[in-house]
Image (spheres, rainbow, N blue to C red):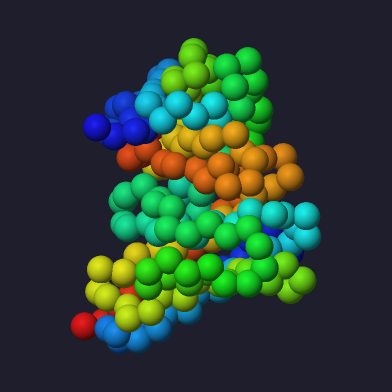
Amino acid sequence: DADVTQTPRNRITKTGKRIMLECSQTKGHDRMYWYRQDPGLGLRLIYYSFDVKDINKGEISDGYSVSRQAQAKFSLSLESAIPNQTALYFCATSDTGQGAGDEQFFGPGTRLTVL
Amino acid sequence: QKEVEQNSGPLSVPEGAIASLNCTYSDRGSQSFFWYRQYSGKSPELIMSIYSNGDKEDGRFTAQLNKASQYVSLLIRDSQPSDSATYLCAVMRSQGNLIFGKGTKLSVKP
């Protein structure tokens, strides 16, 4: 079974709709991250969480919100989707962030299309 | 200056050759560096991490780090067509999150 799972894997929605992307992990990692990837722009960090009570904005958090429901679950919401949020979204996890434990491991991604 | 810079490529090498991928970064305080491989439409896969100056070898892959020059590279020996992918360089910020380069697309020709 995959260590980091994302649901849904593909989603097509309309402008103005509320969308939630979910991420679950069985790696036992404390840290979780949401990224989006656009052609030519690379991976950009949306939000990250170092533990259940910790939420931090990344470089492109406007238009997004997150919820860390448990150590293993981290959800990303688009309150009112717009077409320029069409992208490939990745969840990632990492261990303590200290030295050799800070490698990030990625989920399979969610392809979101906003019409 | 961008935080993490990579040549976007495409870098084309013949099968069996050495592929050399380069990355520069701007934050002198960075201590952790990573190389990810990403096939089209798939998620990034960690292939190497490096924390100290010098070389680190793992199979056909060698990561090289020079903190004084703010430079990290990845060498792939005996390149195979299956190595054709985009390679992402990532640098850990002091805040504890990664900043990624835009990636170098590698094409290994049979």
- The image shows residue A91 at horizontal and vertical percentages of 44, 35
* Snapshot quadrant of residue A54: top right
Residue ID at (39%, 52%): B45
Specify whether A27 is left or right of B32: left
Q: How many badges with numbers are in the image?
A: 0
- The image shows residue A96 at horizontal and vertical percentages of 60, 34
Residue ID at (31%, 69%): B83
- The image shows residue A95 at horizontal and vertical percentages of 54, 35
The C terminus of chain B sits in image quarter: bottom left
* B92 is higher (above) or lower (below) than A10: below
* A38 is higher (above) or lower (below) than B17: above
* Snapshot quadrant of residue B51: bottom right
Q: Nearer the viewer, residue B103 or B37?
A: B37
* B96 is higher (above) or lower (below) than A5: below
* B17 is higher (above) or lower (below) than B43: below
Residue ranking furthest to the left: B110
- The image shows residue A77 at horizontal and vertical percentages of 48, 22
Specify whether B20 is left or right of B82: right
Q: Nearer the viewer, residue B47 or A61?
A: B47
Regarding residue B65, the answer to whether it shows in the image is yes
Regarding residue A34, the answer to whether it shows in the image is no
The N terminus of chain B sits in image quarter: bottom right
* Snapshot quadrant of residue B89: bottom right
Residue ID at (40%, 64%): B86
Q: Nearer the viewer, residue A58 or B33?
A: B33
